[in-house]
Amino acid sequence: MMVKSMMESKETIQISRMNTSFGILQILADTHFVYGVRWVNLHDELEDGIMPGDPAPANQMREELERYFSGDLMEFTTPLLLVGSPFQVSVWEMLRKIPFGETRSYAEMAHAIGNPLAFRAVALANRANRFAIVIPCHRVIYSSGKAGGYRGGIEKKEWLLQHERRKK
């Protein structure tokens, strides 16, 4: 997967929507990169500077998400643009390394970055992740084994984890 970070684009960001069995996903992209994949409500409004559209990376992402939901895709390759602090980007890169169908705890993630006390910072970086499913923050759980904290809702997180375990 091609990933760029901290890069500014002068292109217009476009938004397209994808219906899933658990709700609507918005894909934000320009002609080169996907900027975000997020769960939305029907009442969400477009942000300033974003207009409806289907640039090529959004179409590629939609196809990959469809393959993911059908169980035929375990790793995304659409180019992403990551915008965040160096710490956030490092956490997101670690998330991408969690194998399909597996989980890690926030504490395990903090140990992996070399700071065992940073589990709350890891959780905050997960919360700031703009790429639902694609950068799999849903694979991070509490040390107790419970699935907690997910912007799309705990039901979606649990479904995603079970989906991946079935397809592994």
Image (cartoon, helix red, strand yellow):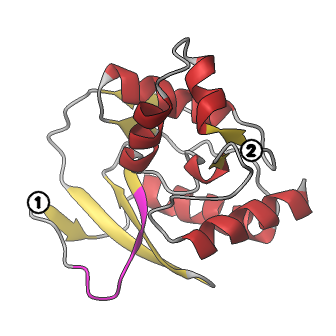
Q: Secondary structure at mark 2?
A: loop
Q: Does residue 89 appear left or right of residue 65 in this picture?
A: left
Whole-percent x, y for residue 38 in the image: 42, 63
Q: Which residue appears at 39% of the width and 30% of the height?
A: 88
What's drawn in magenta, residue-wise? Answer: 37-44
Q: Which of these two is toward me, 163 or 72?
A: 163
Q: Which mark is residue 19?
A: none
What residue would you read off at disc 2? Answer: 103
* Quarter containing the N terminus: top right
Q: Quadrant of residue 17?
A: bottom left
Q: Quadrant of residue 120?
A: top left
**Which amino acid type is marked by label 2?**
Thr
Residue 76 colored magenta? no
Q: Secondary structure at mark 1?
A: loop
Q: Which residue appears at 40% of the width and 32% of the height?
A: 121
What residue would you read off at disc 1? Answer: 49
